[in-house]
Image (cartoon, rainbow, N blue to C red):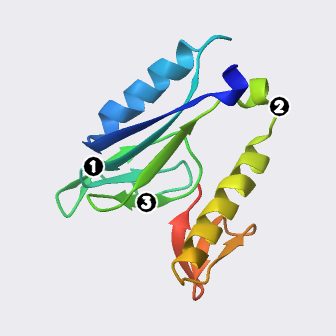
Amino acid sequence: MLLNTIIVRQLGLQPYEKILLSMQTLTNNRNYSTVDEIWLLQHYPVFTCGYNYNNYKLTIHNIPVIKTDRGGKITFHGPGQQIMYVLIDLHRRKISVSYLINILSDIVVNTLKKVGINSYYSRSMPGIYVSKKKFVPLD
């Protein structure tokens, strides 16, 4: 039953730190009966930086900068930008992170194709690209 169920939540406009804490709480309290979830939302203006970002500041143009435990450098999130957080127990589903990224990349590329936007996924520089410019970061 759990492999056939994913809860999708539309959370609207949310502060980044609140959502980060909620994701950490769900993950830390996860057990075998925890249902997987996908959260769709937007953030108030915020920059997030991964451990590869070396120029850390508290704010950029009065927008907060938050260090994260992800890879990559720096990414802006703000109203109008749809964010999808995938909170899936990969071990239980017997899939790898790279396989999940491939599935999500295919979904984005195929969705963009449906609305007339040609795009592609780059494995060497993770993300979805349109006309050689990064459209969707996947870091």
Q: Which mark is residue 73?
A: none
Question: What's the residue at 36%, 45% (across, down)?
Answer: 66
Q: Which amino acid does label 3 sit on?
A: Thr
Q: Which of marks 1 and 2 is nearer the N terminus?
A: 1
> Quadrant of the rendered structure where residue 34 is?
top right
Q: Could you classify mark 2 by the number of other residues whose Cα lies within 10 Å: few (under 14), some (14-19), or many (20 or more)?
A: few
Given contact means CB atoms under 8 Å apart, are the residues at marks 2 and 3 in contact? no
Q: Is residue 66 above or below residue 24?
A: below
Q: Is residue 41 above or below residue 138?
A: above
Mark 1 or 2: in front is: 2
Question: What's the residue at 59%, 50% (across, down)?
Answer: 71
Q: Name the residue under label 1.
A: 58
Given contact means CB atoms under 8 Å apart, are the residues at marks 1 and 2 in contact? no
Whole-Å distance between the Cαs marked 1 and 2? 39 Å
Q: Which mark is residue 75?
A: 3
Furthest-right residue in this view: 94
Is 22 left, or right, of 1 in this rendering?
left
Q: Where is residue 105 in the image (x, y as percent from the top left)?
A: 66, 61
Mark 2 or 3: in front is: 2
Whole-Å distance between the Cαs marked 2 and 3? 30 Å
Is 117 left, or right, of 45 in this rendering?
right
Q: Which of marks 2 and 3 is nearer the N terminus?
A: 3
Q: What element carries label 1?
A: loop
Furthest-left residue in this view: 62
Mark 3 or 1: in front is: 3
Q: Which mark is residue 94?
A: 2
Question: What's the residue at 51%, 73% (across, down)?
Answer: 135
Given contact means CB atoms under 8 Å apart, are the residues at marks 3 and 1 in contact? no
Q: Earlier in the sequence, mark 3 or mark 1?
A: 1
Q: Where is residue 114 in the image (x, y as percent from the top left)?
A: 57, 75
Q: Which amino acid does label 2 sit on?
A: Lys
